[in-house]
Amino acid sequence: NIRGRALRINNIGSGRCSNNTLKSNYTDYSNYQNIESFYTPPSVVSLEDVGSGFTFANNVIDSSYVIGLYGYRTAATIDSNTITNHHSSSLINASMENPTVPLIRYNNLTNNEYAGLRFKEWGSAVVNYNDIFSSSSNSNYYDIYNEVASTSVAEVDARFNYWGETTTAEMSEGGNPKNIASIYDQYDDATKGFVNYGNFLAASGEIPLVAN
């Protein structure tokens, strides 16, 4: 129970942060925040200007009305974390001068209110082998919300993920790639980049379905 951000890691090329539990942060807030109204999005954890030699792994970030993990110009490996019950589990941002691409793998990014993952400005990532879905009834919820122009990042690699029963059923109907209800990308706005959800998993931790 912390009134603000629990952890900020800034300007580091290598290292490791692991096996922490960060729960019920930003206790001054009693409802989900309008993230767009902040110059720097409030988050429980932020990784800013972090190099590819850094690993953020096996942490639990649970329950807040803000972003679980904010990455700005980070090339870190974000591995095997549980980031649940937030406004959005993760927001990834970058700049034209430093268009970093973190590796996001084997994470539980579920039961968030507005998004599993969001990408802004020059933000991108390799997003593989994660669980990304929610029981949110919010009509504005997306598993991935990609706000990045296709002229900045043409495609987000989001293959080999498990998207929950509803979205997996939609993907399994065939005709891929196509407009997926829980993914916001160029199928919703032609100016945005494509989210490649190919080789999706039939269940959490399973091998990819053969025919996708």
Image (tube, rainbow, N blue to C red):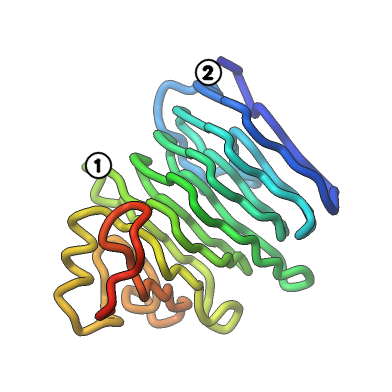
Question: Which residue shows up at 43% across the image and 46% down it?
Answer: 109
Q: Is mark 2 on a helix, strand or loop?
A: loop
Nearest to viewer (mark 1 / mark 2): 1
Between residue 46 and residue 199, name the one nearer to us. Answer: 199
Discs 1, 2 touching: Cβ within 8 Å: no
Residue 161: x %, y % from top left: 39, 61
Question: Which residue shows up at 39% across the image and 78% down it?
Answer: 186
Q: In which quarter of the image is the N terminus?
A: top right
- Asked which quadrant contains residue 172, the reply is bottom left
Q: What element carries label 1?
A: loop
Q: Residue flagged by tag 1: what amino acid is it?
A: Ser
Between residue 58 and residue 29, name the one nearer to us. Answer: 58
Residue that mark 1 sits on = 135
Question: Which residue shows up at 14% across the image and 75% down it?
Answer: 173
Q: Pointer 1: residues within 10 angstroms few (<14), some, or many (20+)? A: few
Q: In this view, does 205 lie above or below 169?
A: above
Q: Residue flagged by tag 2: what amino acid is it?
A: Asp
Residue 179: x %, y % from top left: 26, 75
Q: Earlier in the sequence, mark 1 or mark 2?
A: 2
Q: In this view, does 72 lie above or below 113?
A: below
Q: Quadrant of the C terminus?
A: bottom left
Between residue 106 and residue 48, name the one nearer to us. Answer: 106
